[in-house]
Amino acid sequence: MRKWILAVAALVAVVGPGTGAVWMNSQPSQAADTIVKVDSEKFDPAEITVAPGASITWQNTDQGGVHTAKADDGSFDTGYIDPGGSSKPIAMSKAGSFPYTCELHPYKKGTVKVQ
């Protein structure tokens, strides 16, 4: 039992102090995907702003229907998102304003601003 305690103490002594130094010197990680929820009425939020290179995932919270998010200029298209499902993350690589709609419900509109 004493050997086990000494082994754990040695591990903490070796890993603990260096861990903070590694974190302080490492590059910041990319933020998690921005999530846009889709239901039968709207995109939520309807307008988002992200940095170039950020990814967006659309999440279908409508249990009764399929939805899409398709850029008016064709720069992105989630394809069909099943009820309760999510799109693949879509990376926004160039700056600009990108209006989009649900292909199946054109009254549902949103905008992605990349800046």
Image (tube, rainbow, N blue to C red):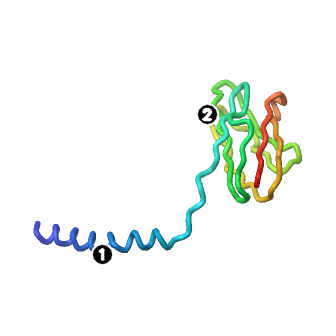
Q: Work out how far the residue at label 2 is from the one at label 1, CA to CA, in angstroms.
A: 45 Å
| Quarter of the rendering occupied by the N terminus | bottom left
Image: 71 above or below 23: above
Q: Which residue is mark 1?
A: 14
Q: Quadrant of residue 14?
A: bottom left
Count all numbered tags in the image, as a single digit. Answer: 2
Q: Is residue 1 left or right of residue 115?
A: left
Residue to which mark 2 is pinned: 84
Q: Dot 2, crowdedness within 10 Å: few (<14), some or many (≥20)?
A: some
Element marked by disc 2:
loop
At a point 60% along the width and 60% down the height, the residue shown is 30
Q: Nearer the viewer, mark 2 or mark 1?
A: 1
Amino acid type, callout 1: Val
Answer with left or right where residue 84 lies relative to residue 101: left
In this rendered view, identify the residue nearer to me: 82 or 6: 6
Residue drawn at point x = 67 percent, y = 24 percent = 64
Q: Are marks 2 and 1 in contact (CB under 8 Å)?
A: no
Image quadrant in which you'd find residue 62: top right
Q: Residues within 10 Å of mark 1 (few under 14, many from 20)?
A: few
Q: Quadrant of residue 7?
A: bottom left
